[in-house]
Amino acid sequence: MYDKRQAKKSKSRISEFYLHLLESVGGILTIFPLIFIIRHKNKKKSYLILSFLWVMLWGIMLYNSFHK
């Protein structure tokens, strides 16, 4: 909601780079609620693709860490 308020005020918004950085360090649990419940960046295909790739990477890492 912060980002949308900033947009309405014509102020700086949260960059996609920062969002992907948060995803990469473990924020993958917030990707789907943000995209599908709050509808944050749900129409931007490049964001969705990169987010999906982060989820896949985290899934592979988690799978490998528990199945050794």
Image (cartoon, helix red, strand yellow):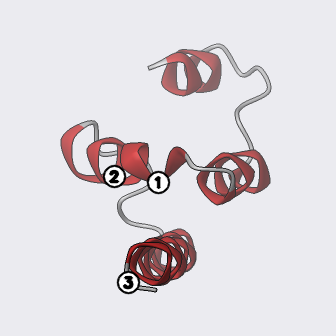
Q: Are marks 2 and 1 in contact (CB under 8 Å)?
A: no
* 42 w.r.t. 7: above or below: below
Q: Is residue 21 left or right of residue 33?
A: right
Considering the numbered disc 1 on the image, is that residue within a helix, a strand or a loop?
helix
Residue beneath disc 3: 67
Quick one: label 1, few (<14), some, or many (20+) residues within 10 Å? some
Give the CA separation, mark 3 to mark 1: 20 Å
> Residue 21 location in percent, x, y?
74, 53
Q: Are marks 3 and 1 in contact (CB under 8 Å)?
A: no
For the residue pair 67 and 5, the one nearer the viewer reads as 67
Dot 1 amino acid type: Ile
Considering the numbered disc 2 on the image, is that residue within a helix, a strand or a loop?
helix
Residue beneath disc 2: 35
Quick one: label 2, few (<14), some, or many (20+) residues within 10 Å? some
In this view, which residue lies farthest toward the left?
37
> Residue 2 location in percent, x, y?
54, 17
Residue beneath disc 1: 28
| Residue at 65% across, 48% down | 19
| Residue at 58% across, 49% down | 26
Q: Is residue 9 left or right of residue 59?
A: right
Q: Earlier in the sequence, mark 2 or mark 3?
A: 2
Dot 3 amino acid type: His
